[in-house]
Image (cartoon, helix red, strand yellow):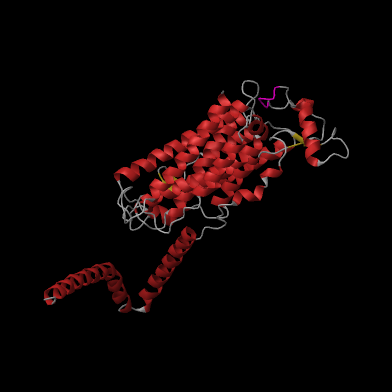
Amino acid sequence: MLDPIVVFFQRVFTAIGRGIGLAVSWFLWPFVALANWYRARSWIIKGPVGLILLGLIVFYGYFVWQTQAWTNFDPDYVDRYKLSERKVPAGSPISGPGTTTGQSGSAAAASQAAAVAPSDASTTEALDMAQLPAGTVCQTSAVVDVAADLIDLTVNQNAWISSMLAYKLGLFGLDWDDTPWLDNKASFQRGINQAVRRTTVELVDSLGRVRGTSGVNNDLQSARGNIQFDEETWYFGINPFGPKTPTPSFYRAAMRDLRKFNISLGKCEAIFDGRSDNMVEFLDRIANDLGNTSAIIRERSEFHNGGWFDTRADDRFWFAFGQLYGYYGILSAAGADFENVVAQRGLTPIYTETMKQLRSALRIQPLIISNGREDGWIMPTHLATMGFYILRVRSNLVEMRDILAR
């Protein structure tokens, strides 16, 4: 009685195997035909064609390697900055004439900072540099350090994927972002870049100047302009036609501008205006930025939930991952730069919890991104999970903003 059932399944699996074989044959046919043609040619033709094929192999081999090798990717990179050892806010004096002999480094820094700090404990006005003795050293900005290092990670320690020629050519003319392959690192880098772009805007508009009483810092202004450059420019372009300066060159210039600002800040020649209202605006802009990403993830999760077959889910996921990776360092650094505001306004517990949530989000590193239904039982919902972490972080940022705004 089981023979008809066995025969039925045999036919089903035979048909599936035949279908897979036809698909593989169809895919390999151009390559087989090219190999047969190549074998029939003379060495006069084989030589140049072979060199071209070798060049293509090297060209795409390098591209594949760069997309798969994530050099110095480290979710715990914040630990390298030893932010807990910073005892004064960014821009405050830490050494120089007037430091009491025999004091510990932190105590000396605190006493000298208090000598020039404003009496209003709820805010930290930018220091009047004319009040500081010559030779005074000020605390550099951890936010600027992290932003510059994130740029260094994406364009120096790794190749900037989005502007590579092989990435721009796509897969037989199909944009790599529309495929499941070789685009995760590009999306991750663009997510980091989004966090750095937002940070440079805030540095120019508020953190790096005393609003209403000082001009825009030239180094920060230059950094903002360079980091805003488009993400896909190669050495040559069509519109407009001609040679171009590639994207990584602009981003490297932005990195140098940020480091120049921090050198000036360390010499007490620049300003970091670490007032509570500036921190409110900084947190608000980041919360809005994360809100936009959350909306993009929600739209993809609700209307395109094709499980493992959603070829754009990985782009959304790794962009959000890169954004959180960048903000993990930037917000951790902001806690050190605004150390007095965080302590005086009682933000330490919620700030610490927010950093823990950011770090927890970076533990989600699936091999294959799935955009399954939230009530599904076969395919995971990685996008919905990432969206959940983004909303948790954003909720905490909004709460901190509200506390500071009271």
Quadrant position of residue 112: top right
- Where is residue 110? Give x, y as percent: 77, 34
**Which residue does the image show at 47% across and 50% down from the upper left?**
188
Rendered position, 394 above or below 118: below
Q: Of all residues shown, which one is farthest toward the top? A: 212
- Where is residue 330? Give x, y as percent: 58, 41
Whether the magenta-drawn stretch holds residue 121 is answered as: yes
Depth order, front residue of 230/132: 132
Q: How many marks?
A: 0
The C terminus appears in which quarter of the rendering? top right
**Which residue does the image show at 34% across and 44% down from the upper left?**
300
Whether the magenta-drawn stretch holds residue 273 is answered as: no
Q: Of all residues shown, which one is farthest toward the right? A: 101
Question: Left of 271 or right of it: where is 380?
Answer: left
Q: Which residues are magenta?
A: 120-124
**Which residue does the image show at 39% across and 38% down from the upper left?**
295
